């Protein structure tokens, strides 16, 4: 599905379902992006009071802890990117939506369910970086280190936002698979 005309045609055919799915994912994304924003407001407004209540221990190896969290944070960003690429690739066979459908009583088409399932996990991972920065701030690190973690977290979340092109790719794959099955059934008959 390379051409813009193909994408626009597909979008027009399934506009209602796609917009509904994107709207729900955008609301979820806004909630997730709220984590770093709330932590920034807390540290900026109440950081001094928080640090007064929890005095940092001078013997705590903050540099080592910071290095470990930076390495883990970079790994998590790369993991998030890789998971998203893999989940939305043609190689990924997907989660078993047929097994989940009767329990969920969901009337959404399978490509919408697949989009929601594939989009959620990579979207949540980058928000944990702001929590790492907050933890370092509480343990006695500077506000600048917290802001560095929070900004990287926000940038990761901006990259992981729900996108119409991803849902269109899944819709195209779903229709292609459905047509393949129908052609096989017609050959058998």
Image: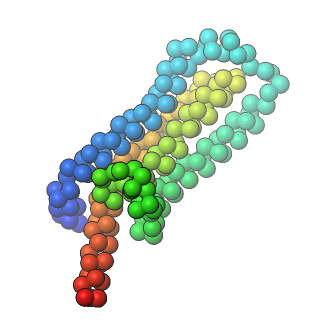
Which quadrant, please, contains the C terminus?
Answer: bottom left
Question: At which x and y percent is residue 121?
Answer: 49, 49
Residue 111 to residue 30: above or below: below
Q: Is residue 182 left or right of residue 96?
A: left
Nearest the camera: 157 or 181? 181
Seen at 67% across and 39% down, the residue is: 69
Seen at 45% across and 47% down, the residue is: 120
Question: At which x and y percent is residue 13?
Answer: 17, 59
Q: Is residue 132 left or right of residue 117?
A: right
Question: At which x and y percent is residue 162?
Answer: 36, 47
Q: Quadrant of residue 32?
A: top left
Looking at the image, the residue that sits furthest to the right is 59
Q: How is the image coloured?
A: rainbow
Residue 87 to residue 21: above or below: below
Nearest the camera: 165 or 10? 10
Residue 178 to residue 38: above or below: below
Total numbered labels placed on residues in the image: 0
Q: Is residue 45 left or right of residue 177?
A: right
Seen at 37% across and 54% down, the residue is: 113
Question: At which x and y percent is residue 134?
Answer: 60, 28
Residue 86 to residue 75: above or below: below
Which quadrant, please, contains the N terminus?
Answer: bottom left
Seen at 31% across and 77% down, the residue is: 181
Q: Is residue 8 visible?
A: no
């Amino acid at each position: 599905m390379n051409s813009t005309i193909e994408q626009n045609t597909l979008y027009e055919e399934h506009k209602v379902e796609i917009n509904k799915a994107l709207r729900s994912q955008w609301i979820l994304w806004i909630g997730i992006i709220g984590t770093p924003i709330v932590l920034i407001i807390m540290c900026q407004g109440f950081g001094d009071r928080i640090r007064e209540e929890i005095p940092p221990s001078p013997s705590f190896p903050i540099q080592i802890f910071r290095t470990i969290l930076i390495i883990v944070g970079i790994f998590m960003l790369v993991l998030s990117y890789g998971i998203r690429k893999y989940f939305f690739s043609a190689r990924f066979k997907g989660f078993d939506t047929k097994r989940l459908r009767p329990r969920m009583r969901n009337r959404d088409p399978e490509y919408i369910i697949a989009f929601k399932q594939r989009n959620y996990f990579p979207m949540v991972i980058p928000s944990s970086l702001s929590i790492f920065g907050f933890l370092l701030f509480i343990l006695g690190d500077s506000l600048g280190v917290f802001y560095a973690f929070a900004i990287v977290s926000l940038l990761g979340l901006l990259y992981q936002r729900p996108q119409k092109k991803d849902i269109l790719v899944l819709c195209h794959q779903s229709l292609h698979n459905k047509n393949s099955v129908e052609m096989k059934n017609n050959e058998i008959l």
